[in-house]
Amino acid sequence: MLATRRRSAIMASEKLALRAVRLAVLDAWEQSGN
């Protein structure tokens, strides 16, 4: 159970990281566009 819980936690943190990167890219793209 520890392995699956750790795996799900890693997946959740990866989702958060991807979301943060996507937001940062969109922010920079909008700033450069405007």
Image (cartoon, rainbow, N blue to C red):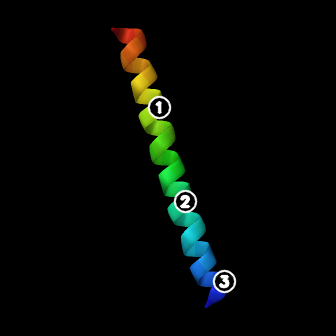
- Residue 13: mark: 2
- Residue 2: mark: none
Query: Residue flagged by tag 1: what amino acid is it?
Result: Ala
Q: Residue furthest right?
A: 3
Looking at the rendered structure, the secondary structure element under dot 2 is helix
Q: Work out whether 7 lies above or below 17.
A: below
Residue 8 in the image: state x and y as whole percent: 54, 73
> Residue 27 falls in which quadrant of the image?
top left
Quadrant of the image containing the N terminus: bottom right
Q: Residue furthest bottom?
A: 1
Residue at horizontal 36 percent and vertical 18 percent from the top: 30
> Residue 23 falls in which quadrant of the image?
top left
Residue at horizontal 42 percent and vertical 19 percent from the top: 29
Q: Work out whether 22 lies above or below 16.
A: above
**Crowd rating for badge 3 (residues with CA inside 10 Å; few <14, some 14–19, many 20+):** few
Looking at the rendered structure, the secondary structure element under dot 1 is helix
- Residue under circle 1? 24
Query: Residue flagged by tag 2: what amino acid is it?
Result: Ser
Residue at horizontal 57 percent and vertical 81 percent from the top: 5
- Residue under circle 3? 3
Residue 20 in the image: state x and y as whole percent: 48, 42
